[in-house]
Image (spheres, rainbow, N blue to C red):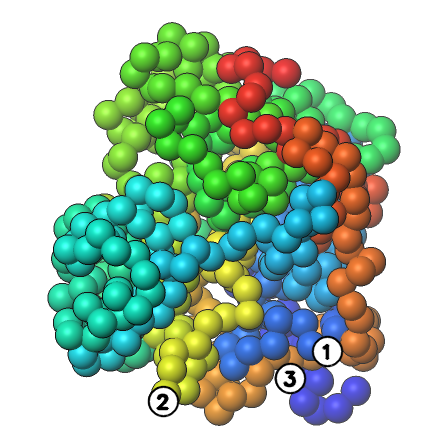
Amino acid sequence: MTDNETIEDIKNIEDTEYVWSALGGDPALVPRVSVTARKGALEARLLVRELARACVGACALAAAELGARRGGLREVPRVRVDDVAVATAFVSERHLLISGRAPVTFAPMSRFWRTADGWVRTHANYPHHRARLLAALGLSDDRVSVVESVLAERSALEVEESVYAAGGLAVALRTPEEWAGHPQGVAVAARSLVEHGRLDATHARVLAPVDGDPLLPAAGLRVLDLTRVIAGPVATRTLALLGADVLRVDRPQLPELPDQHADTGFGKRSTRLDLRADRRAFEELLATADVVVTGYRPGALDRFGLSPEALAERRPGVVVAQLSAWGAYGPWRERRGFDSLVQVATGIATAEGSPERPGALPAQALDHGTGYLLAAGVLRALTEQSYEGGSRFVRLALARTAAWLMHGVGGADAEDDVYAGRGAGAGRGADAGNDVHAGPDGWLAETDSALGRLRYVLPPVSFAGGPVDWGRAPGVWGSDAARWA
């Protein structure tokens, strides 16, 4: 092994230890994780591959830890992280085929635009966001050429503020230095990667023993999924893989994009409820839920009694996992956001771009990485409950994951390496020398579903004795009854 490989080994160990520590895990378990390194996986200037490895590895370790606890195992099963499995999963939407058709990922209005003084990125995949964007610009014509001409006459910050005021989504391009000095950037930097803790002194949770093949650490647990888009659904998709009964609940007035649901709906059921009109049905679900995962803007669900504190009071022993784009703090805490917009605000698009044009990560890595971290946080909370009790909360933000990518992944000198354009590094552990090319085909599978024949990506979360695929394909969005399985 070369000196450079030794340095990379140390950095990858540091990444896993950092994430595991942020989750409150026992550092003695980190050596249970090994990596199969592959060239070409998630290549970028920033250390995306390392971030992805650490997030998936920590999630798998949290699953193995809970599995050992519930299975009465003498030691925690070993975890294997394969770069190709991880890289393929982080672009799962690109590999998905629905009866041979590739899904639509970004709408024409979701893109970078030149402004009078720089660049702005918009997100308008959902029809209501597209309508608000056009309204903010005073347009009824959505031709790209027309929008381009209007934006070219305005400043990026003016567009950002006016579109946000109209309920749309647009973010001005910032450098890392500009974000570091922005009030929201300052607020984000002051927070932990994973915020977690106890909400009360409820008695320890008694988890029923599990055994069998495969080992399902979350078997028998009920997860109420109030998330949308990618990060939250990735987290709940992972909990479903591990045996949880996951029921996604959406407002009837806010349809999900069908292709997005096809990608992230594996293992779950999906229903539609109006939290006002169907309150009784929702309360019946909540009364026996073990975990509640939310992905709406901070505070948006509080009026329905869904803050962590209110949930713990009504359902003692619950685990509440919250996800947001910008964090539940700072001047942007109430703003909507998506992975692509967080990349633009935090300086990632500048770091990955050129003087001529902003760039982007090779995957929506903030979404996927944060999704696996959120699932890991839930699993660790369940393990801690089994020893110490207490209702629990877990809280993550895409912007905080972005800060880690920009300044923390890869060890103390990661920032210098990033701006030198070092790119992804080698693996760690006994398999560090196995740095070979490999394609994604071994991580793709097919199944029939109510949506048609699906080609999809197998889960990257892997531990000895654990599941290798979901127990069910996604159904039609919102078509399931509002009850537990």
The percent coordinates of residue 290 (x first, y second) are 52, 23
Q: Is residue 90 above or below residue 222?
A: below
Q: Is residue 479 above or below residue 162?
A: above
Dot 3 corresponds to which residue? 7
Instruction: Identify the element where label 3 is drawn.
Output: helix
Residue depicted at 22% across the width and 72% down the height = 149
Alpha carbon distance from label 3 to label 2: 31 Å
Alpha carbon distance from label 1 to label 3: 17 Å
Front-most of 62 and 272? 272
**Mark 1 or mark 2, whichever is nearer to me:** 2
Q: Which mark is residue 355?
A: 2
Residue 315: quadrant of the picture: top left
**Mark 3 or mark 2, whichever is nearer to me:** 2
Instruction: Identify the element where label 1 is drawn.
Output: loop
Front-most of 265 and 287? 265
Dot 1 corresponds to which residue? 39
